[in-house]
Amino acid sequence: MRSNRTCATPLAGEGEYALVGHKWFLSAPMSDAWLVLAQAPGGLSCFLMPRRLPDGARNAFRLMRLKDKLGDWANASSEVEFCGAWARRIGAEGRGVATIIEMVMLTRLDCMLGAAAEMRMALAQALHHARHRRAFGRRLVEQPLMANVLADLALESEASTALAMRVARAVDAAARDPAEAAFARVATALGKFWLCRRAAGFVNEAQECLGGAGYVEESMLPRLYRQAPLNSIWEGSGNVQCLDVLRALAREPQSRQVLLHELEQARGHDAAYDAAFDALPPTGEGEVVAEAMARHMAASLAILLQAATLLRAGSPVAAAFIAARLAAPMPPAYGMLDASVAFSDILERAVPSR
């Protein structure tokens, strides 16, 4: 962002500027207005650029081409040139990143919710197929190994949905509750990193539950598979999220305190959770956390936060999730739950309500 070369020249009207520059990527070119970062005399600033001027004339920008993307075709993206486009500054000059980050918190939450929803839809498709497809004299869902895979996916889906809803609650309350605002500051980055990272592998596993049918466009799974990686790229890739977590924990003591308090509230319900909490890696405040370890730290915190959310919600699958994700090193693939897990109970809970 700091290397942004789009130029914003002040006009006669208060807070009005002319934008000149080129952007390789503009999301949603069909919109009526966009938030744009550009270099004003006082530094990088945030601007609202409308499609049409107040008198109804078309604003001075050109959409150069639409991007030929892997997926997300229903939501266009484009390359754009600003040719003296009229825009109004939002926030102070030189505070563009700080201004736009308020929007980014909401869109990061959107990415989390989208990833959790994709997982849930993929799981619903896999469950429906497994409950109706028969092989070797039994329905697929009655096959122990398939039941293991589906149950593991169900654990991941419920934990992801629970975390997304918890972060959404914090974002909703942020304007009136400083503690929830501090929690949302770090939890949106944690959840955005982890849920979006898990979604692509999750959807691929659900595809495999359908066999060849999951690779055919009629099944919906190919579209979900193309869409799944996008949420991890939008609004900052995984590395950006992890470094943001690192900064928040090191520079914003309240964010660190409320996050640890959130995790602490779940202690006493599960011995494996308590042990994982006690073994938590360094999280800032005087501790030097190497950037190279930022993903390790963010993943550990995100999984622990998922577990804490399930425990505090009294979820029946909390113990199974903790046993699979915290009590031992996380297995390299889905479907590797311990044989003692009650697969049928988890799957019964995961079946969409009628």
Image: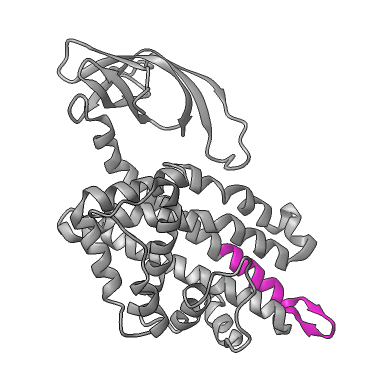
Q: Residue at 71%, 83% (x, y): give it.
A: 144
Which of 15/340 is in front? 340
Position of residue 316 measured from the top left corner of the image (x, y, whole percent): 44, 84
Q: Is residue 272 magenta?
A: no
Residue 97 vertical position relative to residue 327 in the rendered view, above or below: above
Q: Quadrant of the N terminus?
A: top left
- Give the image location of residue 141, x and y in percent: 69, 80
Q: Can residue 242 be seen here? A: yes
118 shown above or below 318: above
Q: Residue at x 66, y 80 (%)?
A: 147
The C terminus lies in quadrant: bottom right
- Left or right, 59 with respect to 215, comes to left
Q: Is residue 137 magenta?
A: yes
- Tell me the magenta residue range: 121-140
Residue 259 in percent (x, y) is at: 27, 63
* Snapshot quadrant of residue 335: bottom right
Horizontally, is 106 left or right of 147 in the view? left
